[in-house]
Amino acid sequence: MKRHVLITGASIAGPALAWWLDRHGMAVTVVERAPSFRDGGQNIDVRGAGRKVVQRMGLEDAIRQRTTHEEAIAFVDERNNVRARIGAEQFRGNGPVAELEILRGELARLLLDHSRGSAEYLFGDRIAALRDRGDKVEVRFERGDEREYDLVIVAEGIGSSTRAMQFGDEVKRVPLDLYIAYFAMPRGENDGNVSRWFNAPGGRSVFLRPDNLGTTRAALSLQEKPRGYEKLSQDEQKALLKERFADAGWETPRVLAALDEAKDFYFESIGQVKMPRWSRGRVALVGDAAYCASPVSGMGTSLALVGAYVLAGELARSDDHARAFAAYERIMRPYVDQAQDVPKAGPRIAQPQTRTGIALQQAALSLATRPVFSWIAGRLLSPPADKIDLPDYGKSAPIAPSAG
């Protein structure tokens, strides 16, 4: 009998999982609380094992056609002088700039379109209650519908509400003492295919990156211990950023001026999710809801794609969901542990508090790109995106979708 699976969350992991589950012969429903597809988002990279997964999905060419064309990251001073530069070609394409850089919204749309014909999507709804009765999971949706499923997979974000229903307070949130605000802004005369990173004293940084839509993606970062800023209203968060970055210099005034018109503004406290288990009964977790490694790890997309692939594959291998969930965790745990091995001092190194610290950071990055030091720097700056042997579950190499 065909399994019926409910996935909650339609960003990266959810649609990827929906596609693979359908390929393995399961009936899939995806519920997403947003009223419609959520576009926007910052630059993300598809690398290592994550790239192998999209190759097996037939999506690599479509992603390549939608890349941001980011060539390098330049670390600049107040006068826009380049103090260090890391190119996409360095560290074998596995450094801070990956070969396949794409906007989060662009990748999410590709995955959604790729899976829409094989999965039922319910936008503007969410799980209000669920009860695992052993043989099925009873689900009541916020809009009032009641259904039952063989399995429920939570593919939500770091603050997943559905995870709390099933796992309670088992989740451990590990803060990395960093706040980041993201938004798109008009492209300026100095913006091009090279991203620019500017540091100001006080643990502040401004990061401007190219996209393929004619705008520039901005990120404002504050290196501080948790202070609850993520709980403020959006207007309060923007006011906070204007106050804290008012004297930062460089091109920061134009970035702050763009805040008021930003329609895709997103502000978050950066941290990780650590769970003692990723399944309970007939409910399992995947992606950020299970093992968010944080944006500073460079591994979020790889974990989402690989986790979806492995979870679907193990469910296809076994009629016993408990055995499949255990195998999924056994395969993924070492990969996740490596991804989450982010030094707590990382944000302080990336956002130094003093001018001396900024000078030392830029000097170290400049040295890192020289041949004599590049092999050491490569180990430090390259995420462990390929540190997993992907099982072959079959059902891959489909006909690639149209890029239109």
Image: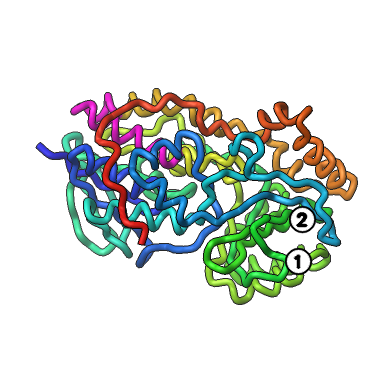
- Write down the residue under mark 2: 198
Residue type, numbered disc 2: Phe
Verify CB contact (< 8 Å) between mark 1 and mark 2.
yes
Which residue sits at x=65%, y=53%?
179
Q: How would you rate the neighbour count of disc 2 (Cα within 10 Å): few for under 14, some for 14-19, many for 20 or more?
A: many
Q: Is residue 319 magenta?
A: yes
**Direction from residue 390 to residue 230 in the image, left or right:** right
**Direction from residue 208 to residue 49 in the image, left or right:** left
Q: Which of 206 and 76 is in front in this view?
A: 76
User: What segment carries the magenta color?
Assistant: 303-324
Q: Residue 136 appears at what percent x and percent y? A: 18, 40
**Direction from residue 361 to residue 15 in the image, left or right:** left
Which residue sits at x=55%, y=54%?
43
Splitting the image into 4 quarters, where does residue 216 fall? bottom right
Residue type, numbered disc 1: Thr
Identify the mark nearer the N-term, 1 or 2. Answer: 2
* Vertical arrangement, residue 180 with respect to residue 233, above or below: above
Q: Can residue 107 be seen in this view?
A: yes
Q: Residue 329 appears at what percent x and percent y? A: 39, 27
Q: What element carries label 2?
A: strand
